[in-house]
Image: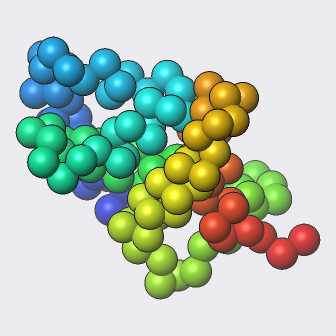
Amino acid sequence: MMRLAALLGVTMIGLWPAVAHATSTADFTLKTTEDLYRVCSVATNDPLRPEAINFCEGFLLGAVSYHDEVTGRENLKRLICYPPTATRDQGIEAFNDWAASHQQDQKFMSDPAVVGAVRALASRWPCKR
């Protein structure tokens, strides 16, 4: 998992210069959960789809990797308990499903992107209490 996270991190850094100069990538700043949803649910015919999906995947993987590392190292309660067979595509789907069902809740959609990501993934893969 750590090697994959490192690989995606390098990939995202490599993509960032191309994304940063595009004129229609304001959502790539990911200030809010709504921004992350726009990036992760980009239309299949959008010219920036490859960059958006890679960015989404990298962001979600980074959030999950951080969650896993902090909860494991600090012995904190896990928030996301995904199965070992969970895929990145399933993570994107989980986030998009959650965000689509919360579009009318501006409190959630205005939260920082990482908060929405963790909320969505914890909703799909809750931990037993």
Residue 118 can be seen in this image: no
Where in the figure is residue 45, as x and y percent of width and height?
Answer: 12, 48
Horizontal arrangement in the rendering, residue 40 relative to residue 125 (left or right): left
Q: Give the camera-side residue of 10 and 28.
A: 28
Count of marks, rendered view: 0
Horizontal arrangement in the rendering, residue 38 relative to residue 119 (left or right): left
- Is 22 located above or below residue 75 in the figure? above
Residue 102 can be seen in this image: yes
Q: Give the camera-side residue of 28 and 11.
A: 28
Where in the figure is residue 14, as x and y percent of width and height?
Answer: 15, 36
Q: Residue at x 18, y 53 (%)?
A: 44
Quarter of the N terminus within the rendering:
bottom left
Residue lying furthest front in this view?
104
Where in the figure is residue 123, as x and y percent of width and height?
Answer: 69, 61
Q: Residue at x 34, y 39 (%)?
A: 39
Q: Residue at x 53, y 50 (%)?
A: 100
Q: Give the camera-side residue of 64 and 107.
A: 107
Q: Residue at x 47, y 54 (%)?
A: 96
Residue 73: quarter of image:
bottom right
Quarter of the C terminus within the rendering:
bottom right
Horizontal arrangement in the rendering, residue 105 relative to residue 21 (left or right): right
